[in-house]
Amino acid sequence: MRYPYQNFYEMLAYHAKRKPGRPALFVGSEKISYRKLLKKVDTLARFLELSDIKKGDRVAIFMQNSKEFVISLFAITKLGAVAVPVNTFLKSDEVAYILNDCEARMLMASAEQKDVVEPLWDTTKIERVVWEGNYEALDNKNIGFDEIFEILESHEKMELPKIDDLAVIIYTSGTTGNPKGAMLSYRNIMHNCEAIGQLTNFTEKDRFIVYLPMFHAFTLTVTVIMPIYYGASYVIIRKIMPFSNIIKQILLKRVTMFVGVPDVYNALSRAKLPWYFMWFQKIRYFVSGAAPLSEATIERFTSKFKKAKLLEGYGLSECSPVVSVNPPWKQKPLSVGPAVPGVEIKIVDEKMLELPAGEIGEIIVKGDNVMQGYLNRPTATDETIVNGWLLTGDMGYLDEEGFLFIVDRKKDLIISKGINIYPREIEEVINAFEGVGASAVVGVPDEKSGEVPVAFVEPAENETIDLKALRAYLKERVANFKLPRDIRVIESLPKNATGKVLKRILKEQLKEEGGIAKK
């Protein structure tokens, strides 16, 4: 596949030169043209250069959805430095692990995250924080975006990165251990932009709305980078709630592309939307990713929104992230579509032998979208990428026409509101609590979230567990979206002969009991 650009900066500069006055970003009542966006990117890149940030250095972005997030992404990568978006729901210890693992030297942060960021001075090697929002700069280690734009002029002459250079590191845990950094090149991400554009005929006239967190691989590629790739524009929404604001902005800004996750489509399919919204909205495509849509949601949604196409796809961070999408001209219920252009999908057995259509096996993927590897983890990389094929760990099958059907996810992965939750991370925190002998976290179905985590705790011998204290302990150390909805103390966890916990039995127990306790 051919790509018109070598890096993100080239795509921005090209459209800024071709149509400088065209809107690139809408933020509230503010409209930012391609010319203005490029100037701010050049200015911030100059600041980074003066701060001794060089090619290959890691700069983390721990920021709410904002124009500053976009400016940071393009400025960091203009230098050939590597952007590391960080989940803004994480707590200080979780953020510190990521910053130390990638050896980040600088952090771009929202003032709303101040309480999480301040402890990082003592636990990481961060040299400077650039703040978005209202934060008082106390010393030269802290500076605001507005101050940078006031004191510096833009500076364009820099050696730009090449297409196979490392662009972004997205942290994803897999199913065990601490988060791993998936290393994505410009080629990896631009493949997704090119492939999705070929399928959907996106043009510069399209307008996206960005309300999902920008740190998420799906949002980052499809709604932050891809519109700039095509010279289109997008509307930035800082937070998903109140959702009425999103509805309002869709109408006011004439949005044509809506990207969401299943819980959003489930809510929209049930919501009583104003008649004028249904009549005047201009959406051409609703794109769904991050987790499977239920058949009931698909039926309700498609019957309600008859003028637009609902495109469901499949992907993972290690694939930048899109692997397959139902094309507009042919969609199959419960399928996540065929491979996007330039990508191959195979279904294989445990011996890596390809299976025929209709047979269930592991999904493996090959193409320009496959990551370079996991940062600092050559063994994990070699186990995941074999002869150029990425082993997803997901189970599924291909039909005779090459449409992919997912039948199961990675064994223990929990997906809540489109965000991956990795049980092992929670278990490790629980196991460090006084009196705990062992623990197991499983995902159970939830109507609103898709899935929620439930923890089973086995006390150490002759110990008792103070549940109130355990919940308080977890709340201090684990992001809110990872907190177990229910914690159950049991005499002993079910295990096999080798001592491995049988989580299947725990899930069956919850199912028999009719779900989880309401908290």
Image: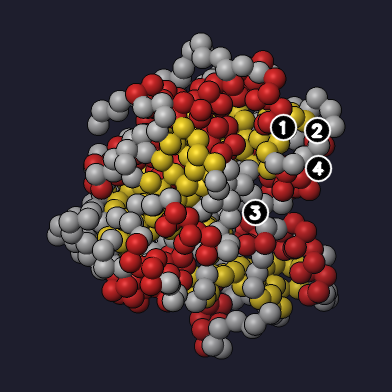
Nearer the camera: disc 1 or disc 3: 1
The reply to whether dot 2 and dot 1 touch (C-beta < 8 Å) is yes
Q: Marks 4 and 2, how far apart in space?
A: 16 Å
In the picture of the structure, the residue carrying the numbered disc 4 is: 119
In the picture of the structure, the residue carrying the numbered disc 2 is: 137
Label 1 amino acid? Gly
Looking at the image, residue 498 sits to the left or right of residue 130; the answer is: left
Label 2 amino acid? Ala
Looking at the image, residue 172 sits to the left or right of residue 331; the answer is: right
Tag 4, which secondary structure? loop
Tag 2, which secondary structure? loop
The reply to whether dot 1 and dot 3 touch (C-beta < 8 Å) is no
In the picture of the structure, the residue carrying the numbered disc 3 is: 89
Q: Earlier in the sequence, mark 2 or mark 1?
A: 2
Q: Position of residue 404 (x, y in %)?
A: 26, 58
The reply to whether dot 2 and dot 3 touch (C-beta < 8 Å) is no
Q: Position of residue 514 (x, y in %)?
A: 54, 88
From where the camera sits, is residue 467 visible?
Answer: yes
Q: Marks 2 and 3, how far apart in space?
A: 24 Å
Circle 1 Cα neighbour tier, 10 Å, few/some/many (<14 / 14–19 / ≥20): many
Tag 3, which secondary structure? loop
The reply to whether dot 4 and dot 3 touch (C-beta < 8 Å) is no
In the picture of the structure, the residue carrying the numbered disc 1 is: 144
Front residue of 91/113: it is 113
Front residue of 130/308: it is 308
**Quadrant where the N terminus is found in the figure:** top left
Q: Earlier in the sequence, mark 4 or mark 3?
A: 3
Nearer the camera: disc 4 or disc 2: 2
The reply to whether dot 4 and dot 2 touch (C-beta < 8 Å) is no
Circle 2 Cα neighbour tier, 10 Å, few/some/many (<14 / 14–19 / ≥20): some
**The label number, if any, that marks residue 449 in the structure image:** none
Up/down of 12 relative to 471, above or below: above
